[in-house]
Amino acid sequence: MRKKNKAQEYLEQIPKLNFMIENKMAEAQQWRDVSLGVTTNTEGERVQSSGNQQKMADAINRVIDLQTEINSMIDRLINLKQQIIRNIEQLSATEYDVLHKRYIQGMTFDEIGAAKHKSKSWATTVHGRALQNLNMILDEREKAEAQEELEAIKERLRRYGIIPNV
């Protein structure tokens, strides 16, 4: 099995987060159903015991907690998509388009190829090249962030007199 590269793992955060949101939403719906469940007798009258009331209250609280989690995950997804788009915008137009269609729009390689009047093979080739170029962009970003962090540490050390001001 081929090892995924850093860029592909970075981009695949989007579908993973989408799946997580979908699953949390399904779980919340199950708890909503539990919270609405009441037993009935043969006459059609509602019968609730205190145990059922507690079960319903617990289910409602679980729905509220899940909805808070879902909202937080949606915020993370929006921020992640914005960050990824900023990074892939640095690629060539064709590479950007393929990665956007694949990871932001969720298209298959067949669909991407068809949309560009090209083959699936063309789409996978461009995708591979785009991942290599995105890896370089991500490496440069990591280096820049590490350098900024190093400079911030040096500044704090200077401020406390641990290293001399130069």
Image (spheres, helix red, strand yellow):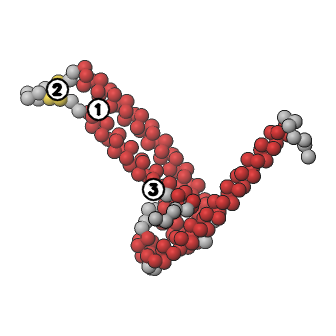
In front here: 122 or 1? 1
Q: Position of residue 99 (x, y in %)?
A: 52, 66
What amino acid type should be assigned to the residue bearing mark 1?
Ser
Rendered view: 68 above or below 8: above
In primary-sequence order, the first of circles 1 and 3 is 3
Instruction: Mark 3: give few (<14), some (14-19) or many (20+) Cα within 10 Å.
Output: some
What amino acid type should be assigned to the residue bearing mark 3?
Pro
Q: Secondary structure at mark 3?
A: helix
Q: CA distance from mark 2 to mark 3?
A: 43 Å
Q: Position of residue 102 (x, y in %)?
A: 47, 65
Q: How many marks?
A: 3
Residue under label 2, please give it.
Answer: 46
Q: Secondary structure at mark 1?
A: helix
Q: Residue at x 8, y 29 (%)?
A: 42
Q: CA distance from mark 1 to mark 3?
A: 30 Å
Res. 15 mark: 3
Q: Nearer the viewer, mark 1 or mark 3?
A: 3
Q: Residue at x 49, y 58 (%)?
A: 12
